[in-house]
Amino acid sequence: MWSVLWAAVRSKAPYVTFPVAFVVGLVGYHLEWFLRGDPSPTAEEEKSISEQREERKLQEIAGKDLTKVVSLKDKLEFAPRAVLNRNRAEKS
């Protein structure tokens, strides 16, 4: 008799587990919402990520003189490093 009972419990477990997990999750969600309250969105949260990124970039370049750039002849970082720097011309 016990084997039949355990077989029935084992076969019906998903039908019992899902509603129990759903109720526990629902109660936990509403309890957390009740304890934390409804946060009002600030001005930073209302902006999209791309807007925040563009504002940050504008603030970074606000005080810089954009007409003065390094010459590509002087700037060698864009070239890949050769093995033991044999192929790279020396700056004089």
Image: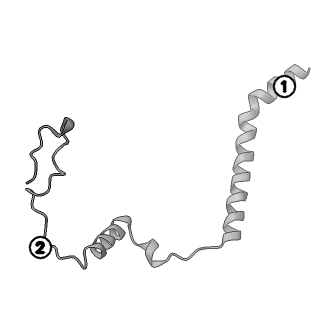
How many angstroms separate mark 2 from mark 1 (CA)? 80 Å
Q: Which mark is residue 67?
A: 2
Q: Is residue 21 left or right of residue 58?
A: right
Name above or below for residue 59 compared with residue 50: below
Q: How many marks?
A: 2
Q: Residue at x 73, y 52 (%)?
A: 23
Q: Nearer the viewer, residue 75 or 7?
A: 75
Query: Quadrant of the rendered structure where residue 29 is?
Result: bottom right
Q: How is the image coloured?
A: one colour
Image coordinates for residue 31, horizontal then vertical, percent:
72, 64
Tell whether 24 sits left or right of 6. Answer: left
- Residue at image x 16%, y 73%? 66
Q: What is the x, y in percent for residue 36?
A: 67, 70
Position of residue 71 measured from the top left corner of the image (x, y, whole percent):
9, 61
Of the 4 image quadrants, the one containing the N terminus is top right
Q: Secondary structure at mark 2?
A: loop
- Using the image, determine if residue 30 lies above or below residue 42: above
* Nearer the observer, 85 or 50: 85
The disc at residue 21 is: none
- Judged left or right of residue 41, residue 91 is left
Determine the residue positioned at 27% across, 74% down. Answer: 58
Mark 1 residue crowding within 10 angstroms, few (<14) / some (14–19) / many (20+) = few
* Amino acid tagged 2: Thr
| Mark 2 or mark 1: whose residue is earlier in sequence | 1
Residue that numbered label 1 is attached to: 6
Q: Return the residue found at the far right.
A: 1
| Amino acid type, label 1 | Trp
Mark 2 Cα shell of 10 Å, populated few (<14), some (14-19), many (≥20): few
The reply to whether discs 2 and 1 touch (Cβ–Cβ < 8 Å) is no
> x and y percent of residue 91 in the render?
10, 52
> Does 65 sit above or below residue 10?
below
SS for dot 1: helix
